[in-house]
Image (tube, grey):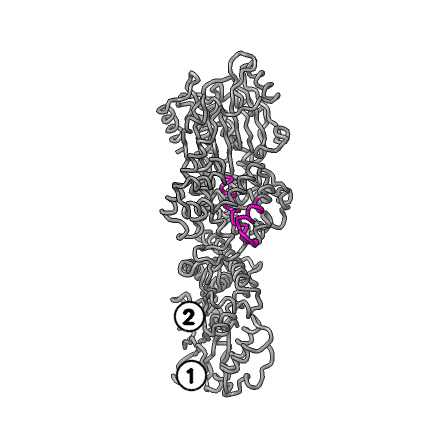
C-alpha cells in the first residue's frame, strides 16, 4: 500500500479533515479504477482504526467492514458498511463515539452493533445481511473475534446453500424484472440490472458455497469495467447514483478517456453480457448440483426398446448404453450427428471431431434450440477452440442449420448468446462485429442493433407458415439492419452487405437477389402504407415495382411485421397493420394479374432416371439407386445429402409407404420430387427423386433399403406399426412452440390439369409418411409432388387428381385438405 501523506494519515485522534483528504484522493492525478478503490478503502480503514483507538474501545470488540467496503471496493460515493462486533456488555456511548465523527465528515454510513451470536442470527433470517457478511474483513480491534465470525458465517452459508441459493436466484430474477437487462438499456442501472455489479457479487457468493463456480474468462475484466464506469459516474454527478443517465454519458466517457458516449455504452454492454452469460452458466450448474443432491435427477425413460434399429431390434449401441446407465453413467440422448443431450444441455458426442467438422457449431446450436436446450459452456468453448472456419461458399448443411437455429424462435436466444460469448457468431458472420452491442438512441427501439436482428428472426419464426421461402424470411430478418454498422443509409449499405453475405452462405443467385431486395426495401411497405394515398395507383406501383413477384411480396409483408414487433410496442399497432395489409392486398392483386398461368415445369428425365424406370416397368419391382450428392448434382444446387432415385410401377399408397420406410431408416428427407413416366408403353411408372440425409450415423446400404421397400410394398412390413412402436419407445423430450401447420388448396390458376395442395409445417420424423397416408386414404392420386425442407420447416406442393385423372372439385379438394390437416394434428 502506498504511504500516506501527513494530512490524510490519521493520528490517534483521526485526521483533521477526512472529507478533504478523501476529495484530494479522488481528484489527484494517477491511477484510478481498482487501485484507487483499494487506496480509498485502506485510508478509510486507517481512519476508522484511529477513531476506534481514540474511543477507548475495550477488549473483546472489533470493527468489521462488510459488503463492498469489506471487499476493499469503495467507490467515490459508496456507503461505509460497518459492523461493531462485541462480546458481553458494551458501553452504550461507545458506538456514538465511533459513528458521530463519520457522520460529521459527510460520509454515508450503514452501521450495526451486534454480538457474534446476534450477527449469525440476523444472517440466518436475512439473506442480504448474510451476503454482506460473506465479505467481512477485519479493520480494528480483536482480530480473533472477526475471524471467528467470518468462519461461522461461511460455514453456515455452505451448510444452508441448498436452501439459500434458490432464494438468491429469486432475488436476481426480481431485480431483472424491475431494472431490466443492463446490456440493452439506454440508461442502465450499473448495479441492479441483469448483468450488473449485483450479479458479480452473487457469483462470488455461489463460489463461496463450493457448489459451483462461474466461468472466469473475461469476468474479472467485465466487473472491473462496470466498477470503473460507476466510479466515473459518481465523480461526474457528485451523487451516489447507479443509473447511467443520458445527460451524464458524454462526461463519463470523457472522464474515462473513451471516444464518445456510444463507445462507452458498447463497452458497458459487452461487460454486462459477459457477466450475464457467466451467471446463466453458473445457475445451470447450481441447478444440476441441487437436483442431484435431492435425488430427483432425471432417470432414463425405458419402455419397450428405447434405442432401436429401423424395425425394432435393440442395437448393440443400445445394449451398451443400457449397461452404462445401469452402472451409473450419465445418460446421453442423441440430438444430431455429433451432438447429444446431457443434463439438460447439448454437448458433443464422444465420437465428435470438431477439427474435421466445421459445420458442427451450427449443427449443435440448431439441435439445442430445436429441443429447447442450450449448448453447454464447455462445448461452446471446445467448438470455438477446435473448429475450423466454414469454407466459402458455405456447405449446404451449414446454411440449413443456421435457418433451423433461427426457426426455433424464442429457444434460439440462449443458444445464440452462448455462441456469441465465445466469438462464434462473429466468426460465422464477420459483419456482425460492427453491429454487436451497438446502441440505438431512439425511443422506439428497445434493443441494441444486434439483439434487434435476432429478435426480428424470433418474430419471423412465428410467420414461416405465411411464406413459400421461410429460409429467406429468417435470413433476411437476421441481416436486415446490418447496414447500421456503416455510414450512410443503412438500407442501402445493407443491400451491399447482404449480397456478399448471402453469396458466402451459398444461396443461389435468385435467392441472393431476393434477400437484397428485402434488405434494401424492408421499410418500404410500412413507409408507403402510412405516408401515401392508398387509393392512388402510383402507391401500389411503388411496391410492385420493387418486389416484382408475389413470393417476394409475401416475404416483405412478413418481414415488415417481424421488424416492427421486434422494435418495440410503439412500432406496430392495429392501425399500421391494417394499412400495410391493405396495401399488400392491392399489390398482390396487381401482381397476380400480371402472372401467367401455365402447367407446372417438368425437366426431361436423366439417363439414370430413364434406366431405373425401364427396369421397374420390365420387372414390376422397385428399382433403386443411391448417389453421392456431388455425383447426382454436380452443380451443387440441391440441399445437402444423398440422392435416392426410386422407380416403382404405379400403385395406391406409394408415397406414404416409401416415406415411411425412409423414416424407419432414420433418413430425413431434404427435398423430393415425384413424377409419372411410361418408358416402354406398359403402364405408368412413378419416379421418385429424393435427397435424404441420415439423422445419425451412416446411410443404410442400398440393398437393405431396397429389400425393406419390397417388403413394405408387398405388405409383409407394416411401416405404420413399426413407426408407432418406435415413437412410443423413444425418450420424451420437451418441445418448442412452433406455428401450426398450414394446409391450403392453391387457386385454380396454379395448374390447369391438377389440384395443387400446399402444405407448410414444422419438420418432424415421419411427416411425409403421415401426409402420404392421408392422401392415400382420401382416394386421390398424387401425380407430381415437390417437397422442400428449409431449415426446420417443410414447404410441399402435391398435384392431385381423382382416379380418372381430373382435377378435384372445390368441395372434394377441401375434404382432402381437411384430412391432411387432421393427420398433421
Residue 223 at x, y percent in the picture: 53, 64
Which disc is residue 120 wearing?
Answer: 2
Q: For residue 757, which quarter of the picture?
A: top left
Which disc is residue 100 wearing?
Answer: 1
Residue 144 at x, y percent in the picture: 50, 76
| Element assignment for label 2 | helix
Rendered residue at 37%/22% (across/down): 809
Structural crowding at the residue carrying mark 1, measured as other residues with C-alpha within 10 Å and reported as few (<14), some (14–19) or many (≥20): few
Against 441, is 694 above or below?
Answer: above
Structural crowding at the residue carrying mark 2, measured as other residues with C-alpha within 10 Å and reported as few (<14), some (14–19) or many (≥20): many
Quadrant occupied by the N terminus? bottom right
| Element assignment for label 1 | helix
Q: Main secondary structure of the magenta part?
A: helix
Q: Which region of the structure is painted magenta?
A: 469-498
495 part of magenta stretch: yes
Q: What is the distance, in whole Å, between disc 2 and disc 1 at their CAs?
A: 26 Å
Quadrant occupied by the C terminus? top left
Against 585, is 808 above or below?
Answer: above
Q: How many marks do you count on the picture? A: 2
The answer to whether marks 2 and 1 mark residues whose Cβ atoms lie closer than 8 Å is no
Q: Is residue 142 among what the camera can see? A: yes
Rendered residue at 54%/12% (across/down): 681
Q: For residue 104, which quarter of the picture?
A: bottom left
Against 77, is 8 above or below?
Answer: below
Rendered residue at 56%/15% (across/down): 679
Earlier sequence position, callout 2 versus callout 1: 1
Residue 64 at x, y percent in the picture: 47, 76
Q: Is residue 383 among what the camera can see? A: no
- For the residue pair 415 and 795, the one nearer the viewer reads as 795
Q: Is residue 163 left or right of residue 710?
A: left
140 part of magenta stretch: no
Mark 2 or mark 1: which is in front? Answer: 1
Amino acid at each position: 500500500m502506498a504511504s500516506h501523506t501527513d494530512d490524510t494519515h490519521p493520528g490517534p485522534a483521526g485526521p483533521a479533515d477526512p472529507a478533504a483528504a478523501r476529495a484530494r484522493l479522488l481528484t489527484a492525478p494517477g491511477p484510478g479504477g481498482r487501485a484507487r478503490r483499494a487506496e480509498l478503502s485502506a485510508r478509510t480503514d486507517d481512519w476508522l482504526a484511529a477513531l476506534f483507538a481514540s474511543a477507548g474501545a475495550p477488549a473483546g470488540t472489533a470493527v468489521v467492514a462488510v459488503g463492498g467496503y469489506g471487499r476493499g471496493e469503495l467507490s467515490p460515493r459508496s456507503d461505509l458498511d460497518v459492523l461493531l462486533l462485541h462480546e458481553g456488555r458494551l458501553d452504550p456511548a461507545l458506538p456514538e463515539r465511533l459513528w458521530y465523527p463519520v457522520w460529521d465528515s459527510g460520509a454515508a454510513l450503514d452501521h450495526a452493533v451486534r454480538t457474534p451470536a446476534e450477527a449469525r442470527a440476523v444472517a440466518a433470517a436475512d439473506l442480504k445481511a448474510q451476503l454482506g457478511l460473506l465479505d467481512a474483513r477485519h479493520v480494528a480491534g480483536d482480530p480473533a473475534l472477526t475471524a471467528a465470525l467470518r468462519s461461522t458465517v461461511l460455514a453456515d452459508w455452505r451448510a444452508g446453500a441448498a436452501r439459500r441459493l434458490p432464494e438468491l436466484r429469486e432475488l436476481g430474477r426480481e431485480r431483472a424484472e424491475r431494472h431490466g437487462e443492463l446490456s440493452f438499456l439506454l440508461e442502465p442501472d450499473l448495479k441492479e440490472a441483469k448483468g450488473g455489479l449485483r450479479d458479480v457479487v452473487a457469483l462470488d457468493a455461489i463460489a463461496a458455497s463450493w457448489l459451483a463456480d462461474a466461468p472466469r474468462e473475461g469476468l474479472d475484466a467485465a466487473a472491473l469495467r462496470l466498477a470503473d464506469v460507476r466510479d466515473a459516474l459518481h465523480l461526474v454527478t457528485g451523487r451516489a447514483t447507479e443509473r447511467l443517465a443520458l445527460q451524464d454519458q458524454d462526461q463519463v466517457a470523457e472522464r474515462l478517456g473513451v471516444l464518445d458516449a456510444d463507445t462507452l455504452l458498447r463497452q458497458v454492454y459487452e461487460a454486462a453480457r459477459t457477466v450475464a452469460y457467466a451467471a446463466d452458466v453458473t445457475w445451470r450448474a447450481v441447478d444440476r448440483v441441487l437436483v442431484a443432491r435431492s435425488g430427483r435427477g432425471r432417470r432414463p425413460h425405458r419402455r419397450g426398446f428405447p434405442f432401436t434399429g429401423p424395425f425394432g431390434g435393440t442395437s448393440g449401441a443400445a445394449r451398451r448404453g443400457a449397461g452404462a446407465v445401469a452402472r451409473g453413467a450419465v445418460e446421453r440422448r442423441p440430438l444430431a450427428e455429433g451432438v447429444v443431450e446431457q443434463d439438460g444441455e447439448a454437448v458433443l458426442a464422444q465420437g465428435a471431431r470438431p477439427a474435421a467438422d466445421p459445420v458442427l457449431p451450427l449443427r449443435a446450436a440448431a439441435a439445442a434450440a430445436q429441443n429447447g436446450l442450450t449448448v453447454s459452456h464447455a462445448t461452446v468453448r471446445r467448438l470455438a477452440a477446435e473448429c475450423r472456419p466454414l469454407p466459402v461458399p458455405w456447405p449446404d448443411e451449414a446454411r440449413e442449420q443456421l435457418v433451423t437455429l433461427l426457426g426455433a424462435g424464442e429457444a434460439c436466444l440462449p443458444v445464440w448468446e452462448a455462441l456469441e460469448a465465445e466469438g462464434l457468431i462473429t466468426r460465422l458472420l464477420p459483419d456482425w462485429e460492427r453491429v454487436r452491442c451497438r446502441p440505438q438512441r431512439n425511443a422506439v427501439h428497445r434493443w441494441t442493433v444486434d439483439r434487434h436482428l435476432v429478435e426480428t428472426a424470433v418474430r419471423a419464426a412465428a410467420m414461416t407458415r405465411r411464406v413459400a421461402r421461410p429460409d429467406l424470411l429468417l435470413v433476411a430478418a437476421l441481416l436486415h439492419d446490418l447496414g447500421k454498422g456503416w455510414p450512410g443509409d443503412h438500407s442501402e449499405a445493407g443491400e451491399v452487405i447482404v449480397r456478399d453475405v448471402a453469396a458466402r452462405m451459398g444461396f443461389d443467385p435468385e435467392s441472393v437477389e431476393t434477400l437484397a431486395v428485402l434488405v434494401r426495401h424492408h421499410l418500404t411497405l410500412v413507409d408507403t402504407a402510412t405516408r401515401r394515398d392508398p387509393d392512388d395507383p402510383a402507391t401500389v406501383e411503388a411496391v410492385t415495382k420493387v418486389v416484382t413477384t408475389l413470393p417476394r411480396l409475401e416475404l416483405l409483408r412478413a418481414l415488415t411485421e417481424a421488424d416492427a414487433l421486434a422494435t418495440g410496442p410503439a412500432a406496430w399497432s392495429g392501425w399500421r397493420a391494417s394499412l400495410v395489409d391493405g396495401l399488400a392486398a392491392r399489390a398482390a392483386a396487381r401482381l397476380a394479374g400480371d402472372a401467367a398461368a401455365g402447367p407446372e415445369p417438368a425437366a426431361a428425365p436423366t439417363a439414370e432416371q430413364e434406366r431405373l424406370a425401364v427396369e421397374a416397368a420390365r420387372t414390376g419391382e422397385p428399382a433403386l439407386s443411391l448417389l453421392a450428392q456431388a455425383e447426382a448434382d454436380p452443380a451443387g444446387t440441391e440441399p445437402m445429402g444423398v440422392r435416392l432415385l426410386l422407380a416403382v410401377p404405379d400403385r395406391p399408397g406409394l408415397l406414404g409407404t416409401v416415406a415411411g420406410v425412409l423414416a424407419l431408416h432414420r433418413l430425413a428427407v431434404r427435398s423430393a420430387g415425384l413424377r409419372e413416366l411410361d418408358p416402354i408403353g406398359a403402364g405408368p411408372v412413378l419416379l421418385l427423386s429424393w435427397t435424404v440425409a441420415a439423422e445419425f450415423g451412416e446411410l443404410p446400404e442400398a440393398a437393405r433399403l431396397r429389400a425393406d421397400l419390397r417388403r413394405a410394398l408387398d405388405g409383409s412390413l407394416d411401416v405404420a406399426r413399426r413407426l408407432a412402436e418406435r415413437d412410443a419407445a423413444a425418450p420424451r423430450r420437451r418441445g418448442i412452440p412452433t406455428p401450426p401447420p398450414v394446409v391450403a388448396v392453391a387457386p385454380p390458376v396454379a395448374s390447369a390439369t391438377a389440384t395443387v395442395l400446399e402444405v407448410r409445417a414444422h419438420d418432424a420424423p415421419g411427416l411425409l409418411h403421415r401426409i402420404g397416408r392421408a392422401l392415400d386414404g382420401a382416394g386421390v392420386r398424387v401425380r407430381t409432388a415437390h417437397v422442400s425442407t428449409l431449415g426446420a420447416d417443410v414447404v410441399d406442393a402435391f398435384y392431385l387428381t381423382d382416379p380418372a385423372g381430373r382435377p378435384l372439385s372445390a368441395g372434394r379438394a377441401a375434404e382432402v385438405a381437411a384430412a391432411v390437416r387432421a393427420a398433421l394434428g
